[in-house]
């Protein structure tokens, strides 16, 4: 299993140009229709130029996020795990 580091959490309007292709590809693969203002976590597979976008609106727990990442054979590093847990808790509250 590869390690992945959180690059950032973006809305579709904020995604850096160099990450747009990864996000569009993952949306097509998942059959996900992006909505304005939704949150998308983007993780970099450590030591590579590969990125794994995760649409946070589709998740209700960190365990679901881990499951999505495991399909890509990656797991979030410890710092990213804590950050993503915090982001998901905040989304659930709102």
Image: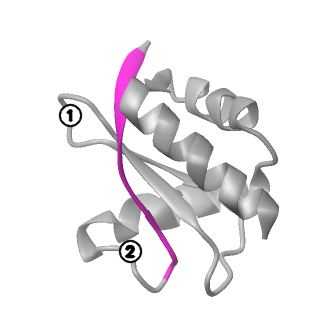
Q: Which residue is mark 1?
A: 48
Residue density around tag 1, few if under 14, some if 14–19, many if 20 or more, within 10 Å: few
Residue 77 appearing in the image: no
Give whichever of 32, 92 is nearer the camera.
92
Q: Is residue 10 above or below residue 6?
A: below
| Residue 90, percent from left and from top | 67, 59
Q: In which quadrant is the C terminus drawn? A: bottom right
Give whichever of 38, 27 is nearer the camera.
38
Q: Is residue 83 above or below residue 57?
A: above
Q: Which residues are magenta?
A: 2-12
Q: Which residue is mark 2?
A: 15
Tell me the residue at 57%/32% (across/down): 69
| Residue 61, percent from left and from top | 77, 40
Residue 47 appearing in the image: yes
In three-dimensional space, the C-alpha distance between marks 1 and 2, rounded to whole angstroms, equals 19 Å
- State left or right for residue 57 relative to residue 49: right
- Marks 1 and 2: which is nearer the front? 2
The answer to which quarter of the image holds residue 52 is top left
The answer to which quarter of the image holds residue 37 is bottom right
């Amino acid at each position: 299993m590869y390690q992945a580091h959180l690059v950032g959490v973006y809305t579709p309007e904020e995604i850096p140009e160099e990450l747009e292709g990864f996000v569009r590809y993952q949306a097509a693969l998942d059959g996900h229709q992006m909505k304005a203002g939704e949150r998308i976590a983007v993780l970099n597979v450590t030591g590579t130029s590969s990125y794994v976008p995760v649409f946070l609106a589709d998740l209700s727990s960190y365990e679901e996020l881990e499951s999505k990442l495991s399909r890509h054979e990656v797991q979030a590093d410890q710092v990213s795990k804590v950050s993503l847990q915090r982001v998901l808790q905040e989304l659930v509250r709102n």
